[in-house]
Image (cartoon, grey):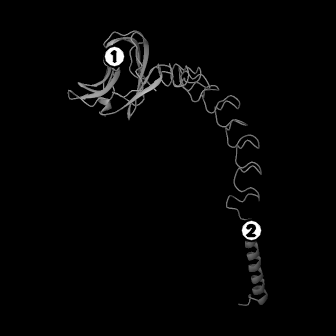
Amino acid sequence: MSDFSLDDAVSGQGNAGNLQSQGQGQQQNYNPWGGQNPGQPYPGFTGPGQPYQGFPGPGQGQYPGNPGQDQQYPGFQGPGQGQQYPQFPPGGAQFPGYAGFAGPGQPFPGAPGQGPGQSFPGAPGQGPGQSFPGAPIPGQGPTAPSAPSGPKKVPFEITLPSGLTNGMMLTVTGKMTGKRFNIDYKEGPNIPFHFNPRVDEKPYSVVRNTMMNGEWGQEEREIPKFPFQLGQPFVIKILFDQNCYRVMVNNENFCQYTHRMKNFAAIKLIRIDGNLDISDATLTTV
């Protein structure tokens, strides 16, 4: 007890304060990474601008092994070569391994690419309307079943595999050689339309009628004039539409015959017979 003094007690408090002050200094300087200097946040840090060991430096890429400026990844062959990835084919090809790609305008191997209308290999491309090989050009040739042009042996028949369709037109060129001739549109044994010029009657007449189940219906005989002369050429045009048969003779309107039988798909035959010579007979669609 005699060795203890107030000064020692005060001195001890002072020492404790010094220790506390020193302890605070040590806390300020403490670094969990090993007590490196300020600015050195972890072992191996190389300084500002070098964010990790081995970084090649500004302008040298973004990671170790980066190939450098304009090299987007390893193996990239450089700008201006059309090379978007390794083994991409030269400019003009759209993907690797595309066999036979010949460049712009050639959308597939072997596409002829010779002008309008060439939409597939072998398309003839000869003008509008050529959507497949051999497709007829509009206004140039028949689009309905027909026989080759030229003289025909009487009786003459034209078959209609799909029946009558709107806009079909029969054109008969010939001359009358005797008493009468007839043009018949046939549905099996029935005759939906019978066109029959006659010079063996007075006055001359052109009879139109329908035969159904073996029986003829009411005749139609009214005409503006009789347009046929023995031995003289004529041209008959019969246009089918959904309402009637429209007849022209020598480029003049002659008559109309309203449909009495309307199963048009079943009309499979046109027959021309009687006292006439046929120079030509064709079926077209207008």
Return the residue nearer the eye: 8 or 153. 153
Residue at figure coordinates x 68%, y 28% from the top left:
81
Residue 267 on image: x %, y %:
30, 27
The tag on residue 244 is: none
> In this rendering, is residue 277 above or below 206?
above
- The kind of secondary structure element at disc 1 is loop
Alpha-carbon distance for marks 1 and 2?
134 Å
Residue 140 shows up from this direction: yes
The residue tagged 2 is: 28
Return the residue nearer the eye: 33 or 189. 189
* Label 2: how many Cα within 10 Å (few below 14, some 14–19, many 20+): few
The residue tagged 1 is: 199
> Where is residue 41, by image quadrant?
bottom right
From the viewer's perspective, is 133 left or right of 69?
left
Residue at figure coordinates x 71%, y 65% from the top left:
30
Asked whether the residues under the numbered discs 1 and 2 touch, taking CB atoms below 8 Å apart as contact, a structural biologist would say: no
Residue 4 on image: x %, y %:
74, 88
Residue 214 on image: x %, y %:
20, 26
1 or 2: mark nearer the eye: 1
Q: Which residue in the rendered view is the most extreme toward the front? A: 202
Return the residue nearer the eye: 176 or 84. 176
